[in-house]
Amino acid sequence: LIGQMVHEIPSVFSFFSPEYSAPGPVTQASLVSPEAQVTAGPNIISLMNGLMSLVKYGLTACWEGFGTLKGSCNRIPSRENSEGNLTLVPTTESDLYTVMTAGRLSKENRQVIRQMFQQETDSRLALMKAQQLIVN
């Protein structure tokens, strides 16, 4: 998980207390949600920024990405300084859903992506837009 660095574990028991209960409905229902202790707004935003950067620009530190800095970030985004790129080109929409969501994408979201594929004439751009829709 973004924000859980391997050498920054606060205790030998991991990043969160097993008894933690997120405020609100979880606590009211007398449930626990240990992982919610580290799922803070800034961590979620960092994850989303990193995923969008990965799809658009490859593995790079530029534009809030997950990579390490390799060269400098240009003012105009490109894949030029990326350490790697997403290269899987699924042969069917179903392959894309399986790889990116383990097949758990809702019918409604599949329909949105299908419509986008039908409207976009550039297949490379269509794949990138589909990946962005899925991670968003």
Image: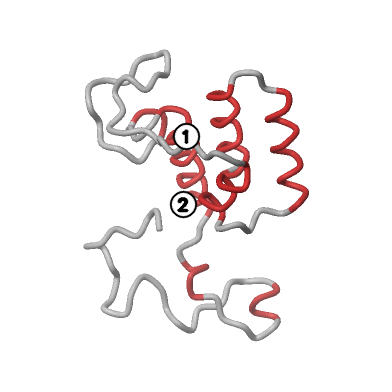
Q: CA distance from mark 1 to mark 2?
A: 19 Å
Earlier sequence position, callout 1 versus callout 2: 2
Identify the disc placed on residue 86. none
- Towards the viewer: 58 or 93: 93
Q: Give the answer, above or below, for where 136 lies relative to 35.
A: above
Are there few (<14), some (14-19), or many (20+) residues within 10 Å of tag 2? some
Residue at figure coordinates x 71%, y 30% from the top left: 116
Q: Quadrant of residue 79?
A: top left
Residue at figure coordinates x 42%, y 18% from the top left: 77
Query: What is the residue that sits farthest to the front in this orientation?
Result: 91
Which amino acid type is shown beneath numbered disc 1?
Answer: Val
Query: Does 54 sit left or right of 109 as displayed?
Result: left
Is disc 1 in contact with disc 2, using a CB cutoff of under 8 Å?
A: no
Please tell me whether mark 1 sits on a helix, a strand or a loop. helix
Q: Give the answer, above or below, for where 100 lies relative to 84.
A: below
Query: Does 53 sit left or right of 107 as displayed?
Result: left
**Residue 120 on image: x %, y %:** 67, 22
Which amino acid type is shown beneath numbered disc 2?
Answer: Asn
Residue at figure coordinates x 44%, y 39% from the top left: 88
Q: Give the answer, above or below, for where 127 lies relative to 51.
A: above
Residue located beneath label 2 in the image:
43
- Towards the viewer: 46 or 21: 46
**Residue 26 on image: x %, y %:** 65, 76
Residue located beneath label 1 in the image:
55
**Residue 12 on image: x %, y %:** 26, 78
- Towards the viewer: 80 or 103: 103
